[in-house]
Image (spheres, rainbow, N blue to C red):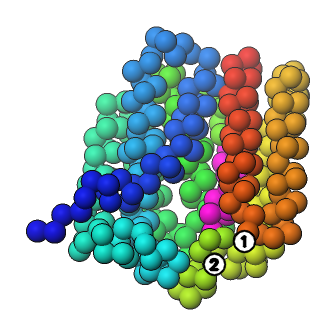
Amino acid sequence: MNVPKLKVVAELLKPITWFPPMWAYACGVISTGESVELYWGKVIWGIVLAGPMVCACSQACNDWFDRHVDAINEPNRPIPSGRMPGKWGLGLAIAWTLLSLFWAWWLGVWAFRAAALGLLFAWAYSAPPLRFKQNGWIGNAACALSYEGLAWLTGAAVMLGNEYPSKAIFGFALIYSFGAHGIMTLNDFKAIEGDRLMKVNSLPVLMGPKGAAWMASLIMILAQWSAAVLLLNAGQSNSAWTVFLLSMCQLPLMYKFVKDPIAKALSVSAFGVPLFVSGMMVSAFALRNF
């Protein structure tokens, strides 16, 4: 039997993509104000659930159902290149789904339900008949909610003993999920050709590259400014100004991005997104004082 190499399996699961949900889970942990030292086991277990489990599963699932699009856009990926033979890609996606649910079970009811919902979004995003990614608005919203909001709320709920997080934590998780919609759009610029041919209506296809660049930038900035205003109203002025200044540092990158979207999308991802997620953590620390 033709078995893929471990290096190819790792490439399919894309460790580089695990950071956003792991970071969001950590933000949820911090936002509760609970002692990380006392619950370090929950923290580590949950971070693994968010990244190497659920997010990795979503990557395997997406690569399997996108193999025809990837054959056009990125033919060197594991499945279209043949380095992941037969139906190994589908098998790994199923296996990782079951493993993620098993892993989540040990974190409690909230984590299990959240993981199940995140995995449902992952399959619905990529697999027919729903295939949310066919529409950039719906698909990016599903990803943003899973990667940011759901991970953030799970981290908070686990630290609170599976109790519901506060309204403030819910609000900031949703605000940064909204902003993450713009981040998800950044990933679509590298696949415009294949998306058009395979009738995947990403935002760069629906709105054109410049229109999508404007929209992604606007969504990211509005989310951060909303967070800053809420922090300011709550008396957290230092945190509010920090989030605002981090957002302003992104504007030069976004200006270049709007002028030349395809060439500059990667630079916003590489340098702008770290500033965005830094603001998330600043907000998380501020929430401890709400």
Residue under label 1 = 262
Residue pictured at 68% horizontal, 79% vertical? 205
Q: Is residue 76 above or below residue 245?
A: below
Q: Name the one closer to the observer, 259 or 164.
A: 259
Residue pictured at 36% horizontal, 67% vertical? 78
**Range of magenta residues:** 174-188
Q: Is residue 200 above or below residue 57?
A: below
Q: Could you tell me residue 196's position as x and y percent?
A: 61, 85
| Dot 2 alpha-carbon crowd within 10 angstroms: few under 14, some 14 to 19, many 20 or more | many
**Count of residue discs:** 2
User: Which secondary structure is most common in the magenta stretch?
Assistant: helix
Give the mark nearer the N terminus: 2 vs 1: 2
Which residue type carries mark 1?
Ile
Q: Write down the quadrant of residue 213 in the picture.
A: bottom right
| Cβ atoms at labels 2 and 1 below 8 Å apart | yes
Q: Could you tell me residue 68's position as x and y percent?
A: 43, 81
* Mark in the foreground, 2 or 1: 1
Magenta includes 183? Answer: yes
Q: What distance separates the C-alpha of mark 2 from that of mark 1?
A: 9 Å
Residue placed furthest toward the bottom: 197
Task: Report the quarter where the N terminus lies.
Answer: bottom left
Q: Could you tell me residue 178's position as x and y percent?
A: 70, 51
Q: Could you tell me residue 102's position as x and y percent?
A: 28, 41
Classify residue 92 as left or right of residue 267. Answer: left
Residue under label 2 = 192
Residue 115 visible, this angle: no
Q: Write down the quadrant of residue 200 in the picture.
A: bottom right
Residue 107 visible, this angle: yes
